């Protein structure tokens, strides 16, 4: 077994910087070191890990497969250490250099990521967010439990007992078509919406197995799937240029109308009520930096989502995190 006492842990930030910058000069600038100092540190790391780690190219350096495998674990370990130091000193958003990893597989992911970055630039300019907005994340729960992600915004509630879920907002489903689509004309003699093939996001799970109000009514329509795609913006683009009916979340309704010229199809059952959850490790609930991150994402959600969703007089359809009771996974 490798003896940690034989490793200079001060070398790990050098490895991280070299990997991310892709050059000695970039790593040196980032760490406020000279290029020879960075080169010497990498030579010691090569001896420690018995691998070249980086191969020189005409421009910069290319990591070896061993460096690729090492990077994720080193970054996670350094993030934990930096976070612990940050927390021990007292978290100050204005001066913090924390790095967070956030997954938003919800279709609003890229747009919410931009909104969150804008908020942080104003109140926490040194805080860095690494985003994943994949619509079909692999092993998201495991990555959250292992600390590879600090926070996720997802409409599928977690099952792991170690994860907590706070309701962020309530989502719905809308069927939308291009202006001039036959499904919008014809009055009483209009063909039923279910007669038209739909374009939808490729599902991650079996909807019929989820206890969501209104889903059964929508499934009973027997919608005929004409095309499944990987990203929600593809649904909007296809629906705007064809006779396929786009199945989209209501939170994208205003964008679908404004930017793609789509209109809601009349005569369909009421939309299902789908809660969207903010998911994270329960053990991190009380951390000031993590609470700050959750609050900032909640405000980014409110800024964007509540503008797009219809709201009744009672406020139904909006579920701010700050006013909602958190739920523990495993007890649903």
Image (tube, rainbow, N blue to C red):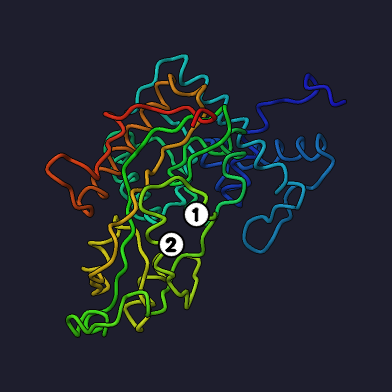
Judge the density around disc 1: few (<14), some (14-19), many (≥20) Cα neighbours within 10 Å.
few
Name the quarter where the N terminus is drawn. Answer: top right
Left or right for 55, reference 307: right
Using the rendered view, name the quadrant where residue 61 is placed.
bottom right
| Left or right relative to 238: residue 59 | right
Q: Which mark is residue 208?
A: 1
- Location of residue 317 with respect to 264 vertically, above or below: above
Q: Identify the residue shown where x is 41% and y is 37%.
A: 278
Q: Position of residue 301 (x, y in %)?
A: 30, 44
User: Where residue 28 sits: x, y (%)?
Assistant: 57, 41
Q: Nearer the viewer, residue 194 or 181?
A: 194
| Furthest-right residue in this view | 1
Left/right placement of residue 66 relative to residue 61 reads: right
Q: Is residue 168 above or below residue 180?
A: above
Mark 2 lies on a secondary structure that is helix
Q: Are marks 1 and 2 in contact (CB under 8 Å)?
A: yes
Marks 1 and 2, how far apart at CA: 8 Å
């Amino acid at each position: 077994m490798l003896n940690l006492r034989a490793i200079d842990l001060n070398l790990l930030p050098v490895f991280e910087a070299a990997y991310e910058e892709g050059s000695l000069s970039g790593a040196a600038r980032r760490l406020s070191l000279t290029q020879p100092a960075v080169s010497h540190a990498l030579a010691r790391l090569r001896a420690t890990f018995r691998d070249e780690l980086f191969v020189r190219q005409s421009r910069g350096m290319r990591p070896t497969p061993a460096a690729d495998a090492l990077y994720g674990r080193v970054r996670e370990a350094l993030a934990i250490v930096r976070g612990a130091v940050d927390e021990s000193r007292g978290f100050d958003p204005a001066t913090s250099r924390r790095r967070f990893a956030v997954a938003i597989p919800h279709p609003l992911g890229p747009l919410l990521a931009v909104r969150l970055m804008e908020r942080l630039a104003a109140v926490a300019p040194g805080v860095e967010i690494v985003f994943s907005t994949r619509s079909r994340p692999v092993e998201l729960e495991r990555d959250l439990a292992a600390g590879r992600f600090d926070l996720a915004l997802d409409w599928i509630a977690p099952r792991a007992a170690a994860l907590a879920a706070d309701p962020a907002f309530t989502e719905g489903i809308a069927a939308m078509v291009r202006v001039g689509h036959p499904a919008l004309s014809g009055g009483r003699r209009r063909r039923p919406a279910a007669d038209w093939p739909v374009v939808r996001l490729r599902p991650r799970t079996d909807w019929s197995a989820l206890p969501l109000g209104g889903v059964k009514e929508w499934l009973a329509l027997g919608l005929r799937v004409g095309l499944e795609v990987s990203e929600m913006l593809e649904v909007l683009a296809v629906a705007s240029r064809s006779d396929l009916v786009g199945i989209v979340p209501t939170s994208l309704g205003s964008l679908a109308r404004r930017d793609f010229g789509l209109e809601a199809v009349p005569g369909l059952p009421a939309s299902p009520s789908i809660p969207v959850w903010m998911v994270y490790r329960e053990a991190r609930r009380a951390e000031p930096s993590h609470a700050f991150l959750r609050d900032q994402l909640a405000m980014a959600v409110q800024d964007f989502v509540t503008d797009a969703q219809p709201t009744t007089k009672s406020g139904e359809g909006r579920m701010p995190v700050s006013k909602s009771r958190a739920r523990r996974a495993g007890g649903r």
